[in-house]
Image: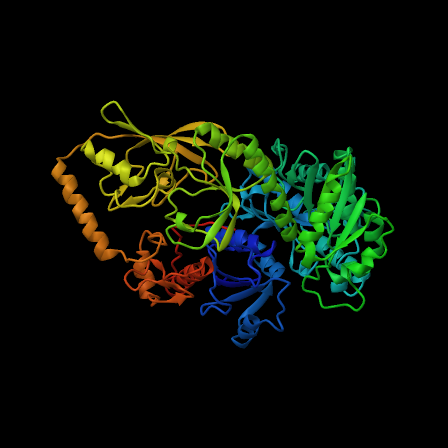
Amino acid sequence: MNKNICMLGICGAGMAPLAVYLVQRGYAVYGWDDYVSLPIKDLLISHGVVFMPEKGLPSNCDYVVRSSAVSENIDSVCQCATKDGIEILRRGEFLAKVCRDRKLLAIIGSHGKTSVSGICVEILKKSGIIFDYVVGGFFKGNAISPSAYDERSEWIVAEVDESDGTIENFSPECTIALNYDDDHICNYGDRDNFLKTFEELFARTKSTIFVPEDDTIFTRIASKFEKKYVKIQGLNGNDFSEKNKAIASFCLHKIFGKDIILPDKITGIQRRNDLMLVTEKFVFLNDYAHHPAEINSLLRYVKTHYKDYELNIIFQPHRLSRTKQYFAEFAAILDRFDRPFVVELYSAFEEKIAGVSSDLVFNNIKNPNKGFLNLAQFSDNIRDIYGKLSSCDKKQLVMFVGAGNILYHAKAFIGEIAFGEAEKAFTKAQIKFSSFEDLTRAFSIKIPTSARICVNPTTRDELIAVLNICHNLKIRYAIIGNGTKILPPDGMVNAVMVMLNSDHWKSLNWVGDNTLHCASGVSLRDFCKSVSEKQFLGTEKLSYIPGHLGGAIFMNAGSHGQTISDHLISIEILDPDGRLHTMEKSSLDFGYRMSSIPRNHIILGATFRFSDQAPKEYFTSVAEELLNWRKTHQPKGINFGSVFKNGDDFCAGELIDKAGLKGSSAGDATISNEHANFIINRGNASSRDIEKLIDLARYTTHIKFGKFLRAEINILRA
C-alpha cells in the first residue's frame, strides 16, 4: 500500500485517532481542517502529522481520506484528487483497509461504542496483551494515546461506525454488538436495509458475535448464527458506566482467556460524563449524549449519584434527521429534569430539512421551567440562569449535553466561574495575584498577550497552594520562566500563569567544594557564571542561552557540545497533586533537547556536581568566542531563538534554507534571511502569523525532503 495520505477534516474525533495510527504504521499524513481544534492539532503534530499551511492536494499524495463532514462532490481538494486519478476514501473505508492484516475486534452499536472501545484498550493494556487499537475519541487527560500500533500485534480493537454507511467494508474476527436503535436509518433507505447491514456484518464475523442479553434486536439477528453467537449475561443495574465495564470484561475474558485484568480505575473518554467544575453549591458536567436513549441513561445515572441536587440540563440537538425522528422522545425525557433548556440545533454536515429545528423539541416540552438559549447570547443567557440558580435553596447540577459545539460555549462560561472561584481562593490564602495582566514583555517574541490570572508565589508552600487551587477547580496553569522558548496566544491565556521571579526561586548555593544546588528560577547566565568562577568545566558554553534553569532542564538545553544535564545529580520536582519528589538523574532520560520529565510537573531545584577545572584564561577566551559566534550566526531582531530541533541526519536551518523559505512572511512575521531556523517578529506579528510559518516550514521540508521538523519551542494555547 502507498504511504502518502491527505486527511480532510483531520481534527474530528474519528479522523484524528486514525491519523495517529497511520503515522505509527509508517504513513506520511498531511492534514487539513476548516475548523482546527488547537489541542487536537498539537496532539497530532506531537505524533508526526504534518498540517498543510493552505488547503490543497500535496504533490506526492496517494490517497485522500475524508471525514463524512467533507463532501466529495464540492470539496476543492477532492475535485483535484478526482482529476488526478487519486482514490478518495471515507474514514471508515480507509480504517477497514488498514485493519485487514489484523484480527479485528469490532465494537458496534447505537450507543457506547467509544466508551467500550476505550475500556477494552485499558483492560488489554493492564493485562499486558500486545494489540493495536483505534478509538473514535480521546481519553481523559490525554495520558493514553487515542490509537496505537505494534508490529508484533495480531489484533486490532476498533469501533465500527454505522452512521456513514462504511460498515460494509469490515470483516471482523470478533464483534461486540452493544445495542440497537433506529438511528442513522436515512443512510440505508429504510429499517429493513439497516438491519440487513448488521446481519451481513455478523455473517462476515469470523469467530464470535457478542450481544447483551437485554438487546432484543441484535439478539434476534445474532441467533441466526448460532455457532458464533455468545450471549453477554449478568448486566444488572442502571449505571451505564458499570455496564460498559462488565461488557468489555466479559468479552475480553472469552477472547483472551483468564489473564485479563480489570484496572482499579478506568480513565474513560472525554465528553462522557465529564466533571467540569465543583463549587460549594454547583456541580457542572458535560456529556456527549445525543440520542434519547443516551440522555435517558444519563438521567438514571445522575438521579442515583446526585440525589440531593436539582437537575438542570442544557441540551443541544444534533443532526436534523435525528431531531425530526426523535423530537417527541427528546421532549419527553427533558420533561423529567427539574429545569430543561434547549439551544440551537447543530446540523453537522446535513442539508436543511424544512420545518426541522430545535423548536420541534422545545415546543413539545411541557415542563413550565423550560427555557431556550440562543448561542449568539449564550454567555449572557447562562449567566442569568446561574444567577437565578445561585439563589435556590438546594444544590444544583448543571449538565451541558449534546454532540455539537455546545461544549465550546460551556467551557467559556465554566472558565468565568472557575476563575472567579480561584480569585476568592487566592484572596483567602493571602496569595498575591493579578487579573488580566499584560504579559507581552514576559515573552521574548513580544506577542501582545495577557493572563487571566497571574501569580508569583514567594515560597514553596505558596506554590503548592496555587497548584492545589488550580487542581481543585480544574484550571490550567503554566510556568512562564524567562519566556524565551514560548509562543503565547493572541489576546489572552485562559490559565493561571505562574511566575517564579521572587528571591526564593533564585537561590544558588555551593555545598562543599564541588556540589551546587540551584532553585529553578536561577538564570542560566548566573548559573554558568557561578560555575566558571570556581573554574569548573562543563557549563561555560551554555552561558549565552537565555532562560531559567527549570526550563533548561526540561528541554535539556545545550550548545556547542555541552548540555545542562551533563553534570546533573538530581532534581526536586512537584507533581500536579502538589506532592514533592526527588528524582535522581539515573531515573531520567535525557536526549537532544528533551527529557523524560512529565510536562505537568514543576522543577523546583536541581543539584549539580563538577570535577575537572581549567585556568581562568580559558573561560575568558571561550566567552569571547561564543560572543563572536552569536554575532555572526544568529540574527538580530525580536525572536525566540531557533524554532526547530536538528535531526540526527540534518540541520533544521539548512533544510529550511534548501526549501527556499528564507524571507517567507505571514503578516509581520518572517523567516530570517540570515538564519532560516529563526522567525523574526518585525514589530506587529501575531501568534497566528508565526504559527503559519511554522506550518509552512514543516510542510515544505517534509514534501521536499521527507524530514519531519520537531519544534524546539512550546506553543501556549489560549
User: From what the image shows, is residue 77 above or below residue 32?
Assistant: below
**Outermost residue toward the right in this view:** 366
* Residue 572 in the image, given as x and y percentages of width and height: 40, 30
Label tally: 0
Asked if residue 410 lies left or right of residue 371, the reply is left
Any part of residue 228 in sight:
no
Image coords of residue 232 (percent x, y) = 75, 40
Q: Is residue 160 left or right of residue 132?
A: right
User: x, y percentage for residue 418?
Assistant: 61, 41
Residue located at (55% from left, 37% from top):
470
Task: Give whichever of 282, 642 is nearer the camera.
Answer: 282
What colour scheme was applied to this rendering of the protein?
Answer: rainbow
Evaluate whether residue 539 shows in this view: yes
Residue at the image point whose x is 12% and y is 35% from the top = 615
- Residue 119 drawn at (x, y percent): 64, 41
- The residue drawn where x is 23% and y is 34% is 531
Picture quadrant where residue 456 is located: top left
The front one of 283 and 657 is 283
Q: Eyeballing the image, is 670 above or below 514?
A: below
Which residue is outermost to the top?
512
Side of 285 where 572 appears, left or right: left
Q: Residue 60 or 549: which is nearer the viewer?
A: 549
